[in-house]
Amino acid sequence: MIEVSVTVNGRAYEEAVAPRLLLSDFLRHTLGLTGTHVGCEHGVCGSCTVIVDDRSVRSCLMLAAQVDGAEVRTVEGLADGDELHPLQAAFRRNHALQCGFCTPGILMASVDFLERSDSPGRRQIAEMLSGHLCRCTGYEPIVESIHAVALQEGQSP
Amino acid sequence: MSWVGKPLERIEDETLLRGRGRFIDDLNPVPGAYHAAVVRSPYAAAHLTSIDASAALASPGVLAVVTGQQVAELTKPFHAVIDTPVAFRAAAVEEVRYAGEPVAVVVARDRYLAEDAAEMVAVEYEPAAPVLTPLDAVAAGAIVSDRSFVYGDPLGKLEEADLVVTESFTFPRWTGTPVEGFGVIADWSAADDALTVWTNFQGPFTLYMAAAAALGLPRSKLRLITPPDSGGSFGIKAAVYTYVVLMGAVSRHLGVPVRWIEDRLEHLAASAASTERVTEVTAGFTNDGKLISLGYDVVEDVGAYLRAPEPATLYRMHGSLSGAYTVQDVSARNRVVLTNRCPTGLNRGFGGPQLYFALEGTMAIAAARLGIDPVDLAHRNLVAAGEFPYTTPTGAIYDSGDYAVCLDDALATVGYAEHRRRQAAARADGRLVGIGIACVVEPSVSNMGYISLAETAQERSGGLPKSGNTEGATISMSPGGGVVVQISTTPQGQGHRTVVSQVVADQLGLEPGDIEVVSVLDTHVNAWSIASGNYSSRFSAMGVAAVQQAAEELTAAIKQIAAHELECAVLDVELRDGKAAVVGQQDAAVSLRRIAGKAHWNPEALPDGVAPGLRFTSFVSAPGLEPAASDDTIASSAVHGFVADVAVVEVDRETGAVTVLDYATTHDAGTLLNPRLVEGQVRGGFAHGAGVALMERLAYDEDGNLITASFMDYLCMTASEVPPLRSSHIETPSPFTALGAKGLGEGNTMSAPVTIANAVRDALGIERLELPLTPSRVWELIEPLS
Ligand code: FES
Ligand code: FES
C-alpha cells in the first residue's frame, strides 16, 4: 500500500492505496466522489476528466499514487455553495445535458480550457470537445454553453 | 396557466450538474457485494472442451469461478417468439457462437482481483469456421425464419410499371453505444428463495418476464429495481436482461451478493447492436412518377442467437412498409438468419434506418432514372393531408399529419431552390455537390403483438393473442399536500421527470417545482406492465397518458372534498395557485394542503364516495393496437409522426471525404410538450443517424473478431464532426394520445443515414452505396469515375 495525501475540492485526505489503483476508482470508490464517471477506461470518452494541479487529466489513465501532494478538483467542487458555476448554469440553460453521464468530465475539461484560452471561438471549443464523447446531445448545445461562458468572461475583466 | 408546451429547464439538471446523479455504479444497495468479471470466448465459433479454473481460484481475493455449466444448472435457455436450433443461455456451455460470449464468471473481493483471475481461467476451445455475413448465413442454411407477405397485387402492378427499379441495400451493424455501459447488482436470498436485482435496464418489461423465466423464478420472486439515473441507452440497455440472469444465477450459486459493471470492451463486443440487413427492393413506377408496386426481399442478421425481442427489428416497421406513400401493392419476404456475431437488439431507430435506407434510396434512384426532381417524386406519392387517419396496406393507422407541408417546410428551411442553383454552379466548376431528401414516417408506441408476425397466422392462432401497449403511473398527495408521481418509463436522459411535472402542474393548478417525480422503477412497488420502459419513443404518448389519467383521478377526489367543504357543486370547483376554488369567486377557496390534511387526518369528514389516502394508480393502453390479423396486417404502432430531411453534401475528389454543407429537418410530432427537450431529442437522434451515415460501424475480421473493439476504433461522432443542423416543426396533434403528442426521439436516426446517402448519390451519380460513407469507401467509388 502507498500513502497518499491529497487535497480534493479543498478538503485534505490521507489514504493508503494499492499501487495500481486508478485515480478514477480512488475518487469514486475510496472517497465516494461518484460525480466523476467512467465510460471507457482507455482514455477516449473523457467522462473521467478531473483537474489535477490546474491541468485537466483523464483520471482513468492516472494512478491514485500519482496525486500524492497534489490538488484535485472534481465536479463536486465546481459550484459555489448554492450558486452553480457559470458553465453549469449555461449547460442547464442550453439543455447541454441529457443523461448527464458525460457532463462532469466535459465540465471539468471546459473549466481548464477556459482558464487557459483567450476568447476561444466555436471551432476551438469543438476541437477541445472532440476528446469527449456525448451520445445524447449532438454536442451543439454544449458548444453553445461553453461559448456563452467564454463570451461572458471576455466581457468581465 | 399551461406549463405543457413551455420550453422549461429540466428538474433533472441541477443534481446531474453537481455530480450528484445516482447511476448504477454509484449505488451500494447491499453490503459486502462481491465483484464479478466475465470470462469470454475469444472465438466467434468454437467447441468448448474444458475449463480449468485452478490458477484463478488460487489467485488472491477470489471467492469462486462459476462456469457456464454451473449457470446452466440453475437456469433455463431464453425463449424467443420463434424456436431456433441453438439454445441461448446466459453463458455458453459446450458451444460458443460469438467472440465475447460469456463462458464463466470470476467472483472476487474487488474488481481488480476479479479481472486478474479472469485472465487465469484456462479455457480450451476447438475453433470452427464462423459465418459472418447475412448472405453467407443464407448460403450456410442458417435461416431461422422465412415468411412472405403479400398485400394487394404487387406482381400484377409491376407489369403495369414503366420503370422497375431493382436494387440491393445493405445497412451495417452499428450501435448507439451509450457512454455508461451495463451494470447489475444481484442479491439472492436463500431465506425466501428470491432474487433482488438493481440494474440499468430500460424495458420493455417483456424482457423482465424473459429473465424471470430463464431464472426459473415465479415472477413475484424476481424484484428488479432501476437506479435513479442511467447514462443513456438508445435501446442497447434492453439487452442487460441476460446479465440479470447470469449474475442472478451466480449470486444464487454462491449465496453472496454480486456486482458486475461492464467495461467498454465488453460493451462493444458483447452487449447488443443493430441488425445488419440486406434488402433487395423491386419497385415499379409509372412514367409520371407514381410508385405503384413495392417489394422487399430482406435478409436480417440477428447475430449468434435470436435474443428476445428479436426479430422485432424486422417487424417494428411492418405497418409502415409503404413509408409515407400511397402505394397499395406491397410485398415482403423476411428471412432471419444467425451469424457468429454479437446478438442484436434494440438500437435507436429500430428497423427504421434499415427500412428507409432501402425505400428512400429507391425513391432517389427512381427520381434520377425518371428525370424527375426527387421533391416532385415525393409529392406525387405522399399521403395527402385529407386522407388521415390513413390505413396502410400492411395495417398501420397513420393518425394525423400533413406530409406535403412538412416537406415544403424543410425545403424552405434549407433553401432548396437556391441550393440547386449553387449545385449547378459548383458542378460547372467540377465540384461534387449533391442534394438528398428523405420522407420518413416515424412510428411510436409499439404494438406488443407485432412480433408475432414472425409466426404464421396458423401458428399464432394457437397462442395467447398479444396486442396493445400499456403503461401505468401512480400519483399521491401526502398529509402535508406534497405531490409525488411515480412513473414506469425508465428514462435514460430524456427528461421524463420534467415533462411529467409540467403535465401534473397543469392538472392540479400547481407549479412544476411543486411536483416530485420519481423515475426509479421497482417491480414490487411501481405500476408497470409488460410494455413499460423507454423504447419505441412511447413516453410522450403512453407515459404521459398514464400520468394524466392518474392526475385526473386525484383532481376529481380533491374537487369532491373541496365542494363538500365549500358547499358548492363539484363542477364549480377549479384548481389554481395551490387552492381549490369556486369558479368566479375570489374568496371561496380552500388550500390543497387543507384538503390533503382532511383526507389523511380526518377521513370521517370526507364526503361519500371519496376514499381516504389520496393515492391513485392508473393504467392506460394505446388505442387501435389490435393483434396481428389473419391476413397478416398489423397496426404495428399507435402513433405516427413525420420527418422530412434535406441534406446538401460535397465530396472531396482527392480524399473521398463527405462534408455535409447544410442539413434541414422538419418534424411533425404532434403537440410538443416541451420544445427544449424536443430539440435535444432531434439533435441527439440526428447525431446517431449522421454517425452511421458517415463513420460508425461495427466491423469484424474474417475470424469474427470485432475490429472496432474500443473507442479508439469504433468512431463515435465528436463535436467537430457532427454536421450543422437546422430543425423546425409543424404540429398536427395526434387524435390518439392524451395531449396530442407523438414520439420523436428516433426520427432523425431513421432519416439521416439515407438522406446523406441520397445526397452522395446525387453528387456522384452512383446508385449503389454502402454505409458508412467513409473517405476510403467513397474514394473507391469516385476513383473509376475520374
Ligand atoms: S473513462 Fe477515462 S477517458 Fe473514458
Ligand atoms: S448527456 Fe448523455 S452522454 Fe452526454
Image (tube, coloured by chain):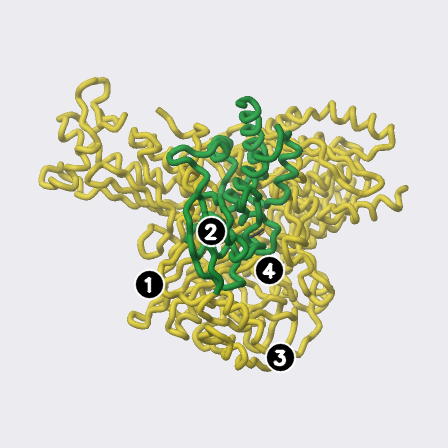
Callout 3 crowding tier (Cα within 10 Å): few <14, some 14–19, many ≥20? some
User: Is label 1 or label 4 in front?
Assistant: 4
Residue B456: image location, x then y, percent:
55, 60
User: Is label 2 or label 1 in front?
Assistant: 2
Furthest toward the front, the residue is A69
Determine if the C-beta at disc 3 is less than 8 A from ligand 1: no
Q: Which mark is residue B124?
A: 3
Amino acid type at circle 3 is Glu
Mark 1 to mark 3 CA distance (whole Å) = 39 Å
- Chain drawn yellow, letter? B
Against B67, residue B467 (above or below) is above
Q: Residue at x 40, y 58 (%)?
A: B198
Q: Which mark is residue A6?
A: 2
Amino acid type at circle 2 is Val
Against A65, residue B470 (above or below) is above
Callout 4 crowding tier (Cα within 10 Å): few <14, some 14–19, many ≥20? some
* B590 on left or right of B530: left
Mark 2 to mark 1 CA distance (whole Å) = 48 Å
- Chain drawn green, letter? A
* A128 on left or right of B479: right
Q: Residue at x 81, y 38 (%)?
A: B652
What residue does disc 1 label? B220
What residue does disc 4 label? B265
SS class, disc 1: helix
SS class, disc 4: helix
Could you say which quadrant of the image residue B139 lies in? bottom right
Which chain contains the residue that carries disc 1? Answer: B
User: Is label 1 or label 3 in front?
Assistant: 3
* B31 on left or right of B456: left
